[in-house]
Image (cartoon, coloured by chain):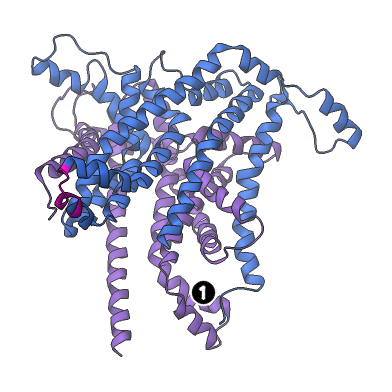
Amino acid sequence: MKTLGSSIYQRLVIIIPYAWLLIFFLAPFLIVFRISLSTKALSVPPYDPAFSWSDSFGDWWDKLQSMSFDNYTWLAGDPLYFNAYLQSLKIAGISTILTLIIAYPIAYGMAQAPRSIRPTLLMLVILPFWTSFLIRVYSWMAILSTTGLLNQLLMALGVIHEPLVILNTNTAVYIGMVYSYLPFMVLPLYSSLEKMDGTLIEAAQDLGCTPIGAFWRVTFPLSIPGVIAGCMLVFIPAVGEFVIPDLLGGSETLMIGKVLWSEFYGNTDWPLASAVATILLLVLVVPIVFFQHVQAKADEKGR
Amino acid sequence: MIRWSRFNIISVTLGLAFLYLPILLLVIYSFNASRLVTVWGGFSTQWYGHLLRNNDMLNAAWLTVRIAVFSATIATVLGTLAALTLVRYTRFRGRILFSGMIYAPLVMPDVITGLSLLLLFVAAGIDRGFWTIVMAHTTLTMCFVAVVVQSRLLSFDRSIEEAALDLGAPPVRTFFEITLPIIAPAVFSGWVLALTLSLDDLVIATFASGAGAKTLPMLIYSQVKLGVTPEINAICTILIGVVTVGVICASVVTKRREVQRQRDEHAAAAA
Protein backbone atom coordinates (compact mmCIF):
# COMPACT_ATOMS: atom_id res chain seq x y z
CA MET A 1 0.00 0.00 0.00
CA LYS A 2 1.35 3.35 -0.96
CA THR A 3 0.64 6.44 1.09
CA LEU A 4 1.17 10.11 0.62
CA GLY A 5 4.56 10.91 2.00
CA SER A 6 7.22 8.67 3.46
CA SER A 7 9.34 11.05 1.44
CA ILE A 8 10.69 14.55 1.41
CA TYR A 9 7.11 15.83 1.04
CA GLN A 10 6.07 14.32 4.34
CA ARG A 11 8.95 16.12 6.02
CA LEU A 12 7.97 19.41 4.40
CA VAL A 13 4.33 19.01 5.41
CA ILE A 14 5.42 18.61 9.01
CA ILE A 15 8.30 21.06 9.11
CA ILE A 16 6.67 24.17 7.61
CA PRO A 17 3.82 24.64 10.12
CA TYR A 18 5.99 23.29 12.92
CA ALA A 19 8.73 25.83 12.28
CA TRP A 20 6.21 28.66 12.04
CA LEU A 21 4.68 27.79 15.40
CA LEU A 22 8.07 27.36 17.04
CA ILE A 23 9.15 30.81 15.86
CA PHE A 24 5.91 32.72 16.37
CA PHE A 25 4.29 30.87 19.23
CA LEU A 26 6.84 29.14 21.43
CA ALA A 27 9.90 31.37 21.05
CA PRO A 28 7.96 34.51 22.08
CA PHE A 29 7.18 32.96 25.46
CA LEU A 30 10.86 32.36 26.11
CA ILE A 31 11.49 35.99 25.25
CA VAL A 32 8.72 37.10 27.60
CA PHE A 33 10.32 35.06 30.36
CA ARG A 34 13.73 36.50 29.59
CA ILE A 35 12.46 40.06 29.71
CA SER A 36 10.58 39.40 32.93
CA LEU A 37 13.99 38.86 34.50
CA SER A 38 15.40 42.18 33.37
CA THR A 39 15.06 45.65 34.80
CA LYS A 40 13.12 48.64 33.57
CA ALA A 41 15.08 51.28 31.70
CA LEU A 42 14.14 54.67 30.27
CA SER A 43 15.23 53.91 26.74
CA VAL A 44 14.14 52.05 23.64
CA PRO A 45 13.42 49.18 24.16
CA PRO A 46 12.49 50.13 27.70
CA TYR A 47 14.43 47.42 29.48
CA ASP A 48 18.01 46.27 30.03
CA PRO A 49 18.19 42.76 28.65
CA ALA A 50 19.11 40.16 31.23
CA PHE A 51 20.95 38.22 28.54
CA SER A 52 22.18 39.11 25.15
CA TRP A 53 22.92 36.67 22.35
CA SER A 54 26.30 38.26 21.76
CA ASP A 55 27.51 37.66 25.32
CA SER A 56 30.40 35.31 25.80
CA PHE A 57 30.02 32.32 28.07
CA GLY A 58 31.69 34.15 30.96
CA ASP A 59 29.29 37.06 30.61
CA TRP A 60 26.39 34.65 30.69
CA TRP A 61 27.63 33.23 33.95
CA ASP A 62 28.00 36.69 35.46
CA LYS A 63 24.57 37.69 34.34
CA LEU A 64 23.07 34.46 35.56
CA GLN A 65 24.35 35.31 39.01
CA SER A 66 23.11 38.86 38.91
CA MET A 67 19.79 37.86 37.33
CA SER A 68 16.97 39.77 38.85
CA PHE A 69 13.80 38.27 40.19
CA ASP A 70 12.86 41.78 41.32
CA ASN A 71 9.76 41.88 39.14
CA TYR A 72 8.45 38.71 40.73
CA THR A 73 9.21 39.83 44.29
CA TRP A 74 7.51 43.11 43.43
CA LEU A 75 4.44 41.23 42.18
CA ALA A 76 4.40 39.04 45.27
CA GLY A 77 4.81 42.01 47.58
CA ASP A 78 2.02 44.15 46.17
CA PRO A 79 -1.45 42.83 47.07
CA LEU A 80 -2.89 44.66 44.04
CA TYR A 81 -1.55 42.02 41.68
CA PHE A 82 -2.52 39.10 43.85
CA ASN A 83 -6.05 40.48 44.08
CA ALA A 84 -6.18 41.00 40.34
CA TYR A 85 -5.24 37.37 39.68
CA LEU A 86 -7.76 36.22 42.26
CA GLN A 87 -10.53 38.43 40.91
CA SER A 88 -9.82 37.32 37.33
CA LEU A 89 -10.20 33.69 38.37
CA LYS A 90 -13.37 34.52 40.30
CA ILE A 91 -14.99 36.54 37.50
CA ALA A 92 -14.00 33.95 34.89
CA GLY A 93 -15.28 31.13 37.10
CA ILE A 94 -18.65 32.74 37.80
CA SER A 95 -19.01 33.73 34.14
CA THR A 96 -18.30 30.15 33.08
CA ILE A 97 -20.95 28.75 35.44
CA LEU A 98 -23.53 31.34 34.34
CA THR A 99 -22.75 30.62 30.69
CA LEU A 100 -23.16 26.90 31.29
CA ILE A 101 -26.54 27.40 33.01
CA ILE A 102 -27.82 29.56 30.17
CA ALA A 103 -26.27 27.55 27.34
CA TYR A 104 -27.43 24.11 28.45
CA PRO A 105 -31.18 24.56 27.78
CA ILE A 106 -30.38 26.21 24.45
CA ALA A 107 -28.09 23.37 23.35
CA TYR A 108 -30.57 20.79 24.65
CA GLY A 109 -33.44 22.43 22.80
CA MET A 110 -31.39 22.52 19.61
CA ALA A 111 -30.46 18.85 19.93
CA GLN A 112 -34.14 17.97 20.36
CA ALA A 113 -35.25 20.10 17.42
CA PRO A 114 -36.53 18.44 14.25
CA ARG A 115 -33.58 17.20 12.21
CA SER A 116 -34.47 19.44 9.27
CA ILE A 117 -34.09 22.75 11.14
CA ARG A 118 -31.00 21.83 13.19
CA PRO A 119 -28.48 23.17 10.62
CA THR A 120 -30.37 26.47 10.53
CA LEU A 121 -30.39 26.77 14.33
CA LEU A 122 -26.68 25.95 14.40
CA MET A 123 -26.05 28.63 11.80
CA LEU A 124 -28.05 31.16 13.85
CA VAL A 125 -25.96 30.46 16.94
CA ILE A 126 -22.67 30.74 15.03
CA LEU A 127 -23.59 33.89 13.08
CA PRO A 128 -23.12 36.42 15.93
CA PHE A 129 -19.69 34.90 16.49
CA TRP A 130 -18.72 36.04 13.00
CA THR A 131 -19.70 39.63 13.71
CA SER A 132 -17.20 41.72 15.56
CA PHE A 133 -16.61 40.92 19.19
CA LEU A 134 -15.77 44.55 19.93
CA ILE A 135 -19.02 45.73 18.35
CA ARG A 136 -21.09 43.26 20.33
CA VAL A 137 -19.50 44.40 23.59
CA TYR A 138 -19.99 48.02 22.56
CA SER A 139 -23.70 47.50 21.90
CA TRP A 140 -24.10 46.46 25.54
CA MET A 141 -22.71 49.85 26.59
CA ALA A 142 -25.70 51.52 24.92
CA ILE A 143 -28.10 49.07 26.54
CA LEU A 144 -26.75 49.13 30.08
CA SER A 145 -25.82 52.77 30.68
CA THR A 146 -27.91 54.85 33.10
CA THR A 147 -29.63 56.60 30.19
CA GLY A 148 -29.51 53.38 28.23
CA LEU A 149 -32.24 51.35 26.62
CA LEU A 150 -32.72 48.90 29.46
CA ASN A 151 -33.27 51.68 32.00
CA GLN A 152 -35.56 53.55 29.60
CA LEU A 153 -37.63 50.42 29.16
CA LEU A 154 -37.84 49.61 32.87
CA MET A 155 -38.75 53.22 33.76
CA ALA A 156 -41.39 53.36 31.03
CA LEU A 157 -42.88 50.16 32.37
CA GLY A 158 -42.84 51.64 35.86
CA VAL A 159 -40.74 48.79 37.28
CA ILE A 160 -38.16 51.24 38.60
CA HIS A 161 -38.17 54.97 39.26
CA GLU A 162 -34.46 55.59 39.56
CA PRO A 163 -32.15 54.37 36.78
CA LEU A 164 -30.15 51.29 37.75
CA VAL A 165 -26.40 51.61 37.68
CA ILE A 166 -25.27 48.56 35.74
CA LEU A 167 -22.63 49.83 33.34
CA ASN A 168 -19.16 50.05 34.93
CA THR A 169 -19.91 47.37 37.50
CA ASN A 170 -19.06 43.69 37.73
CA THR A 171 -22.66 42.85 36.77
CA ALA A 172 -22.07 44.41 33.37
CA VAL A 173 -18.87 42.39 33.03
CA TYR A 174 -20.77 39.16 33.75
CA ILE A 175 -23.45 40.08 31.19
CA GLY A 176 -20.78 40.87 28.60
CA MET A 177 -18.86 37.66 29.31
CA VAL A 178 -21.93 35.41 29.13
CA TYR A 179 -23.08 37.13 25.97
CA SER A 180 -19.71 37.00 24.18
CA TYR A 181 -18.80 33.45 25.13
CA LEU A 182 -22.25 31.85 24.80
CA PRO A 183 -21.62 30.27 21.36
CA PHE A 184 -18.37 28.70 22.66
CA MET A 185 -20.43 26.89 25.30
CA VAL A 186 -23.47 26.04 23.16
CA LEU A 187 -21.51 24.40 20.32
CA PRO A 188 -19.63 21.68 22.26
CA LEU A 189 -22.73 21.00 24.39
CA TYR A 190 -24.86 20.67 21.28
CA SER A 191 -22.43 18.31 19.58
CA SER A 192 -22.32 16.00 22.59
CA LEU A 193 -26.10 16.12 23.15
CA GLU A 194 -26.87 15.64 19.48
CA LYS A 195 -24.82 12.45 19.27
CA MET A 196 -26.73 10.94 22.17
CA ASP A 197 -28.87 7.90 21.57
CA GLY A 198 -32.51 8.81 22.29
CA THR A 199 -33.41 5.21 23.08
CA LEU A 200 -31.39 5.45 26.30
CA ILE A 201 -33.88 8.00 27.66
CA GLU A 202 -36.79 5.86 26.57
CA ALA A 203 -35.26 2.87 28.31
CA ALA A 204 -34.78 4.90 31.50
CA GLN A 205 -38.37 6.08 31.38
CA ASP A 206 -39.67 2.59 30.66
CA LEU A 207 -37.81 1.43 33.72
CA GLY A 208 -39.69 3.99 35.79
CA CYS A 209 -37.46 7.06 35.76
CA THR A 210 -39.23 10.42 35.80
CA PRO A 211 -38.22 12.76 32.93
CA ILE A 212 -36.17 14.85 35.35
CA GLY A 213 -34.62 11.75 36.87
CA ALA A 214 -33.76 10.47 33.40
CA PHE A 215 -32.15 13.79 32.60
CA TRP A 216 -29.88 13.75 35.66
CA ARG A 217 -29.05 10.06 35.48
CA VAL A 218 -28.65 9.61 31.73
CA THR A 219 -28.53 12.79 29.66
CA PHE A 220 -26.35 14.96 31.87
CA PRO A 221 -23.64 12.35 32.60
CA LEU A 222 -23.41 11.57 28.89
CA SER A 223 -22.96 15.26 28.05
CA ILE A 224 -20.04 15.73 30.49
CA PRO A 225 -17.35 15.80 27.75
CA GLY A 226 -19.26 18.66 26.11
CA VAL A 227 -19.62 20.43 29.46
CA ILE A 228 -15.88 20.20 30.11
CA ALA A 229 -14.91 21.34 26.62
CA GLY A 230 -17.34 24.26 26.79
CA CYS A 231 -16.19 25.34 30.25
CA MET A 232 -12.55 25.32 29.17
CA LEU A 233 -13.30 27.27 25.99
CA VAL A 234 -14.97 29.93 28.12
CA PHE A 235 -12.87 29.92 31.29
CA ILE A 236 -9.34 30.14 29.89
CA PRO A 237 -9.79 33.16 27.60
CA ALA A 238 -12.09 34.80 30.17
CA VAL A 239 -9.30 34.85 32.80
CA GLY A 240 -7.13 37.03 30.59
CA GLU A 241 -9.98 39.02 29.06
CA PHE A 242 -9.19 42.65 28.36
CA VAL A 243 -11.91 44.23 26.21
CA ILE A 244 -14.97 43.29 28.29
CA PRO A 245 -13.70 44.50 31.71
CA ASP A 246 -12.22 47.57 30.06
CA LEU A 247 -15.41 48.69 28.32
CA LEU A 248 -18.12 47.36 30.65
CA GLY A 249 -16.33 47.12 34.00
CA GLY A 250 -15.69 49.87 36.51
CA SER A 251 -13.06 50.76 39.04
CA GLU A 252 -14.05 47.76 41.17
CA THR A 253 -13.30 45.43 38.28
CA LEU A 254 -9.67 44.49 38.54
CA MET A 255 -8.84 41.84 35.98
CA ILE A 256 -5.30 40.78 35.21
CA GLY A 257 -5.62 41.30 31.45
CA LYS A 258 -6.40 44.95 32.11
CA VAL A 259 -3.56 45.24 34.64
CA LEU A 260 -1.14 43.82 32.09
CA TRP A 261 -2.38 46.24 29.43
CA SER A 262 -2.06 49.30 31.67
CA GLU A 263 1.32 48.18 33.01
CA PHE A 264 2.50 47.91 29.42
CA TYR A 265 0.91 50.97 27.81
CA GLY A 266 0.36 53.19 30.86
CA ASN A 267 3.55 52.67 32.84
CA THR A 268 5.60 51.29 29.92
CA ASP A 269 7.10 48.83 32.39
CA TRP A 270 7.78 46.01 29.95
CA PRO A 271 9.67 43.77 32.37
CA LEU A 272 6.87 43.95 34.94
CA ALA A 273 4.22 43.36 32.25
CA SER A 274 6.24 40.32 31.14
CA ALA A 275 6.32 39.00 34.70
CA VAL A 276 2.53 39.49 34.96
CA ALA A 277 2.14 37.56 31.69
CA THR A 278 4.49 34.78 32.80
CA ILE A 279 2.51 34.17 35.99
CA LEU A 280 -0.81 34.35 34.13
CA LEU A 281 0.55 31.78 31.71
CA LEU A 282 1.59 29.50 34.57
CA VAL A 283 -1.87 29.84 36.12
CA LEU A 284 -3.44 28.86 32.78
CA VAL A 285 -1.10 26.04 31.79
CA VAL A 286 -2.90 23.51 33.99
CA PRO A 287 -6.36 24.10 32.47
CA ILE A 288 -4.89 24.21 28.96
CA VAL A 289 -3.13 20.87 29.37
CA PHE A 290 -6.34 19.48 30.83
CA PHE A 291 -8.32 20.86 27.89
CA GLN A 292 -5.93 19.29 25.41
CA HIS A 293 -6.24 15.98 27.19
CA VAL A 294 -10.04 16.12 26.93
CA GLN A 295 -9.76 17.17 23.29
CA ALA A 296 -7.43 14.27 22.45
CA LYS A 297 -9.84 11.84 24.11
CA ALA A 298 -12.78 13.24 22.16
CA ASP A 299 -10.77 12.91 18.93
CA GLU A 300 -10.03 9.28 19.66
CA LYS A 301 -13.73 8.65 20.20
CA GLY A 302 -14.59 10.46 16.99
CA ARG A 303 -12.28 8.26 14.97
CA MET B 1 -40.72 9.26 21.73
CA ILE B 2 -38.88 12.51 22.28
CA ARG B 3 -40.42 15.50 20.60
CA TRP B 4 -39.65 19.16 20.50
CA SER B 5 -41.42 20.24 23.66
CA ARG B 6 -42.62 23.72 24.46
CA PHE B 7 -39.80 24.10 26.98
CA ASN B 8 -37.22 23.37 24.28
CA ILE B 9 -38.79 25.81 21.86
CA ILE B 10 -38.89 28.57 24.46
CA SER B 11 -35.28 28.08 25.56
CA VAL B 12 -33.97 28.12 21.99
CA THR B 13 -36.05 31.20 21.15
CA LEU B 14 -34.94 33.08 24.26
CA GLY B 15 -31.34 32.11 23.61
CA LEU B 16 -31.45 33.40 20.06
CA ALA B 17 -33.24 36.58 21.20
CA PHE B 18 -30.46 37.20 23.72
CA LEU B 19 -27.84 36.73 20.99
CA TYR B 20 -29.53 38.94 18.42
CA LEU B 21 -31.22 41.72 20.40
CA PRO B 22 -28.08 43.85 21.00
CA ILE B 23 -27.05 43.53 17.36
CA LEU B 24 -30.54 44.45 16.19
CA LEU B 25 -30.68 47.52 18.45
CA LEU B 26 -27.33 48.66 17.11
CA VAL B 27 -28.55 48.40 13.53
CA ILE B 28 -31.77 50.29 14.35
CA TYR B 29 -29.94 53.10 16.14
CA SER B 30 -27.52 53.54 13.24
CA PHE B 31 -30.49 55.12 11.41
CA ASN B 32 -31.16 57.50 14.29
CA ALA B 33 -31.31 61.20 13.41
CA SER B 34 -30.39 62.25 16.93
CA ARG B 35 -26.81 62.84 18.00
CA LEU B 36 -27.58 61.15 21.31
CA VAL B 37 -27.05 57.48 20.86
CA THR B 38 -29.86 56.25 23.08
CA VAL B 39 -32.58 58.79 22.22
CA TRP B 40 -34.61 58.18 19.09
CA GLY B 41 -34.85 61.30 16.95
CA GLY B 42 -36.38 59.98 13.75
CA PHE B 43 -35.06 58.06 10.76
CA SER B 44 -31.94 59.30 9.01
CA THR B 45 -29.03 57.95 7.04
CA GLN B 46 -26.81 60.94 7.83
CA TRP B 47 -24.26 58.90 9.82
CA TYR B 48 -23.54 56.78 6.78
CA GLY B 49 -22.81 60.00 4.90
CA HIS B 50 -20.48 61.17 7.66
CA LEU B 51 -18.73 57.84 7.44
CA LEU B 52 -18.06 58.11 3.72
CA ARG B 53 -16.31 61.43 4.29
CA ASN B 54 -14.24 60.11 7.18
CA ASN B 55 -10.86 59.34 5.64
CA ASP B 56 -9.32 57.91 8.81
CA MET B 57 -12.11 55.38 8.97
CA LEU B 58 -11.85 54.44 5.30
CA ASN B 59 -8.07 54.08 5.44
CA ALA B 60 -8.30 51.92 8.54
CA ALA B 61 -10.97 49.75 6.92
CA TRP B 62 -8.86 49.23 3.79
CA LEU B 63 -5.79 48.38 5.88
CA THR B 64 -7.82 45.90 7.94
CA VAL B 65 -9.15 44.17 4.82
CA ARG B 66 -5.69 43.87 3.27
CA ILE B 67 -4.24 42.44 6.49
CA ALA B 68 -7.12 39.97 6.76
CA VAL B 69 -6.76 38.73 3.17
CA PHE B 70 -2.99 38.26 3.45
CA SER B 71 -3.04 36.60 6.85
CA ALA B 72 -6.04 34.38 6.08
CA THR B 73 -4.39 33.13 2.90
CA ILE B 74 -1.06 32.32 4.55
CA ALA B 75 -2.89 30.83 7.53
CA THR B 76 -4.95 28.60 5.25
CA VAL B 77 -1.84 27.13 3.63
CA LEU B 78 -0.08 26.61 6.96
CA GLY B 79 -3.24 25.42 8.71
CA THR B 80 -4.00 22.87 6.01
CA LEU B 81 -0.45 21.50 6.24
CA ALA B 82 -0.80 21.38 10.02
CA ALA B 83 -4.11 19.50 9.72
CA LEU B 84 -2.49 16.96 7.36
CA THR B 85 0.29 16.52 9.90
CA LEU B 86 -2.17 16.06 12.75
CA VAL B 87 -4.28 13.48 10.93
CA ARG B 88 -1.81 11.63 8.72
CA TYR B 89 1.48 11.56 10.57
CA THR B 90 0.65 10.38 14.04
CA ARG B 91 4.15 9.25 14.85
CA PHE B 92 7.09 11.61 14.76
CA ARG B 93 9.34 13.17 17.34
CA GLY B 94 7.79 16.25 18.89
CA ARG B 95 4.23 15.33 17.92
CA ILE B 96 2.87 16.16 21.39
CA LEU B 97 4.50 19.59 21.33
CA PHE B 98 3.09 20.13 17.84
CA SER B 99 -0.51 19.36 18.76
CA GLY B 100 -0.08 21.43 21.93
CA MET B 101 0.99 24.42 19.84
CA ILE B 102 -2.06 23.92 17.58
CA TYR B 103 -4.59 23.85 20.42
CA ALA B 104 -3.05 26.37 22.82
CA PRO B 105 -3.59 29.52 20.68
CA LEU B 106 -7.31 28.65 20.43
CA VAL B 107 -7.77 29.38 24.13
CA MET B 108 -4.78 31.57 24.98
CA PRO B 109 -5.83 35.04 26.19
CA ASP B 110 -5.15 37.70 23.57
CA VAL B 111 -3.07 39.85 25.88
CA ILE B 112 -0.49 37.09 26.36
CA THR B 113 -0.28 36.22 22.67
CA GLY B 114 -0.07 39.88 21.74
CA LEU B 115 2.54 40.83 24.31
CA SER B 116 4.75 37.84 23.52
CA LEU B 117 4.67 38.54 19.78
CA LEU B 118 5.47 42.20 20.33
CA LEU B 119 8.48 41.30 22.44
CA LEU B 120 9.60 38.88 19.72
CA PHE B 121 9.42 41.61 17.08
CA VAL B 122 11.32 44.02 19.32
CA ALA B 123 13.97 41.40 20.17
CA ALA B 124 14.40 40.55 16.48
CA GLY B 125 14.58 44.23 15.58
CA ILE B 126 11.66 44.08 13.14
CA ASP B 127 9.84 47.35 12.51
CA ARG B 128 6.22 46.96 13.45
CA GLY B 129 3.48 47.68 10.96
CA PHE B 130 1.50 45.93 8.27
CA TRP B 131 3.57 42.76 8.05
CA THR B 132 3.97 42.20 11.77
CA ILE B 133 0.17 42.28 12.14
CA VAL B 134 -0.10 39.83 9.24
CA MET B 135 2.39 37.49 10.92
CA ALA B 136 0.62 37.74 14.28
CA HIS B 137 -2.80 37.07 12.76
CA THR B 138 -1.44 34.19 10.69
CA THR B 139 -0.10 32.52 13.83
CA LEU B 140 -3.42 32.82 15.61
CA THR B 141 -5.74 31.89 12.76
CA MET B 142 -3.74 28.99 11.27
CA CYS B 143 -4.70 27.00 14.36
CA PHE B 144 -8.41 27.60 13.72
CA VAL B 145 -7.94 26.56 10.08
CA ALA B 146 -6.08 23.43 11.21
CA VAL B 147 -8.95 22.39 13.49
CA VAL B 148 -11.59 22.96 10.79
CA VAL B 149 -9.64 21.08 8.09
CA GLN B 150 -8.68 18.33 10.52
CA SER B 151 -12.31 17.43 11.15
CA ARG B 152 -12.87 17.08 7.40
CA LEU B 153 -9.76 14.94 6.96
CA LEU B 154 -10.87 12.59 9.72
CA SER B 155 -13.92 11.57 7.67
CA PHE B 156 -11.88 11.27 4.47
CA ASP B 157 -11.94 7.99 2.57
CA ARG B 158 -8.27 7.35 1.93
CA SER B 159 -8.80 4.52 -0.51
CA ILE B 160 -9.31 7.05 -3.35
CA GLU B 161 -5.92 8.53 -2.60
CA GLU B 162 -4.31 5.12 -2.41
CA ALA B 163 -5.87 4.18 -5.74
CA ALA B 164 -4.35 7.26 -7.38
CA LEU B 165 -0.93 6.48 -5.89
CA ASP B 166 -1.15 2.83 -6.94
CA LEU B 167 -1.98 3.96 -10.46
CA GLY B 168 1.29 5.86 -10.46
CA ALA B 169 0.34 9.44 -9.64
CA PRO B 170 3.13 11.23 -7.79
CA PRO B 171 2.23 12.33 -4.20
CA VAL B 172 2.10 16.04 -5.00
CA ARG B 173 -0.19 15.48 -7.95
CA THR B 174 -2.38 13.15 -5.91
CA PHE B 175 -2.69 15.84 -3.29
CA PHE B 176 -3.70 18.56 -5.74
CA GLU B 177 -6.00 16.41 -7.88
CA ILE B 178 -7.64 14.13 -5.33
CA THR B 179 -7.15 15.30 -1.73
CA LEU B 180 -7.48 19.04 -2.11
CA PRO B 181 -10.71 19.06 -4.16
CA ILE B 182 -12.34 16.78 -1.59
CA ILE B 183 -11.33 18.84 1.43
CA ALA B 184 -11.87 22.14 -0.44
CA PRO B 185 -15.12 23.12 1.37
CA ALA B 186 -13.37 22.79 4.74
CA VAL B 187 -10.32 24.68 3.49
CA PHE B 188 -12.59 27.43 2.23
CA SER B 189 -14.55 27.72 5.47
CA GLY B 190 -11.21 27.77 7.30
CA TRP B 191 -10.17 30.71 5.14
CA VAL B 192 -13.42 32.58 5.86
CA LEU B 193 -13.03 31.92 9.57
CA ALA B 194 -9.43 33.18 9.51
CA LEU B 195 -10.56 36.26 7.60
CA THR B 196 -13.24 37.21 10.12
CA LEU B 197 -10.98 36.54 13.10
CA SER B 198 -8.41 38.86 11.60
CA LEU B 199 -10.97 41.57 10.76
CA ASP B 200 -12.22 41.35 14.33
CA ASP B 201 -9.04 41.36 16.32
CA LEU B 202 -8.19 44.33 18.49
CA VAL B 203 -5.76 43.24 21.18
CA ILE B 204 -3.20 41.31 19.14
CA ALA B 205 -3.23 43.89 16.34
CA THR B 206 -2.60 46.68 18.86
CA PHE B 207 0.46 44.91 20.24
CA ALA B 208 1.76 43.90 16.82
CA SER B 209 1.38 47.30 15.15
CA GLY B 210 3.65 50.27 15.31
CA ALA B 211 2.77 53.93 15.21
CA GLY B 212 1.81 53.85 11.54
CA ALA B 213 -0.69 51.05 11.15
CA LYS B 214 -4.10 51.52 12.73
CA THR B 215 -6.71 48.88 11.98
CA LEU B 216 -10.45 49.46 12.09
CA PRO B 217 -11.01 47.70 15.44
CA MET B 218 -8.23 49.86 16.92
CA LEU B 219 -9.93 52.99 15.59
CA ILE B 220 -13.37 51.89 16.81
CA TYR B 221 -11.91 51.06 20.20
CA SER B 222 -10.29 54.46 20.65
CA GLN B 223 -13.53 56.21 19.61
CA VAL B 224 -15.64 54.06 21.92
CA LYS B 225 -13.29 54.98 24.76
CA LEU B 226 -13.75 58.67 23.99
CA GLY B 227 -17.50 58.41 23.93
CA VAL B 228 -20.10 56.85 21.73
CA THR B 229 -20.98 58.52 18.43
CA PRO B 230 -23.75 57.37 16.07
CA GLU B 231 -21.11 57.09 13.35
CA ILE B 232 -19.83 53.97 15.10
CA ASN B 233 -23.28 52.45 14.92
CA ALA B 234 -23.21 53.03 11.18
CA ILE B 235 -19.80 51.43 10.63
CA CYS B 236 -20.78 48.53 12.87
CA THR B 237 -23.96 48.00 10.86
CA ILE B 238 -21.99 47.94 7.62
CA LEU B 239 -19.55 45.41 9.09
CA ILE B 240 -22.41 43.25 10.35
CA GLY B 241 -24.03 43.39 6.89
CA VAL B 242 -20.81 42.45 5.10
CA VAL B 243 -20.12 39.55 7.43
CA THR B 244 -23.70 38.27 7.29
CA VAL B 245 -23.76 38.31 3.50
CA GLY B 246 -20.30 36.70 3.39
CA VAL B 247 -21.19 33.91 5.76
CA ILE B 248 -24.48 33.18 4.01
CA CYS B 249 -22.71 33.04 0.63
CA ALA B 250 -20.01 30.81 2.08
CA SER B 251 -22.53 28.41 3.54
CA VAL B 252 -24.52 28.26 0.31
CA VAL B 253 -21.33 27.50 -1.67
CA THR B 254 -20.28 24.85 0.84
CA LYS B 255 -23.71 23.28 0.80
CA ARG B 256 -23.87 23.24 -2.98
CA ARG B 257 -20.45 21.61 -3.25
CA GLU B 258 -21.45 19.05 -0.65
CA VAL B 259 -24.59 18.16 -2.59
CA GLN B 260 -22.58 18.02 -5.83
CA ARG B 261 -20.03 15.74 -4.23
CA GLN B 262 -22.69 13.38 -2.93
CA ARG B 263 -24.29 13.29 -6.37
CA ASP B 264 -20.90 12.50 -7.96
CA GLU B 265 -20.30 9.74 -5.47
CA HIS B 266 -23.72 8.25 -6.20
CA ALA B 267 -23.05 8.45 -9.92
CA ALA B 268 -19.67 6.80 -9.45
CA ALA B 269 -21.21 4.05 -7.34
CA ALA B 270 -23.94 3.46 -9.94
CA ALA B 271 -21.48 3.30 -12.81
Q: Check if residue A11 falls in the magenta segment.
A: no
Q: Is residue A7 above or below residue A40?
A: below
Identify which residue, B264 or B35, lies in the foreground.
B264
Image coords of residue A50 (percent x, y): 77, 28
Mark 1 surroundings within 10 Å by alpha-carbon count, few (fewer than 14), some (14 through 19), many (20 or more): some
Q: Check if residue A210 falls in the magenta segment.
A: yes
Q: Is residue A135 left or right of residue A215?
A: right
Chain letter for the part of the structure drawn in purple: B
In the rendered image, which residue does mark 1 sit on?
B175
Residue lying furthest bottom in this view? Answer: B271
Image coords of residue A219 (percent x, y): 26, 47
Image coords of residue A130 (percent x, y): 34, 46
Residue lying furthest top in this view? Answer: A162
Looking at the image, can residue B209 be seen? no
- Image quadrant where residue A171 sits: top left
Q: In the rendered structure, the residue with mark 1 lies on which chain?
A: B
Q: Colour of chain A?
A: blue
Looking at the image, can residue A222 be seen? yes
At horizontal 41% and vertical 13% (from top left) the residue drawn is A251
Start-end of magenta stretch: A203-211
Q: Is residue A303 above or below residue B121?
A: below
Quadrant of the image for the N terminus of chain B? bottom left
Secondary structure found at label 1: helix
Identify which residue, B38 or A125, lies in the foreground.
A125
- Image quadrant where residue A61 sits: top right
- Image quadrant where residue B225 sits: top left
Amino acid type of the residue that numbered disc 1 sits on in the rendered structure: Phe
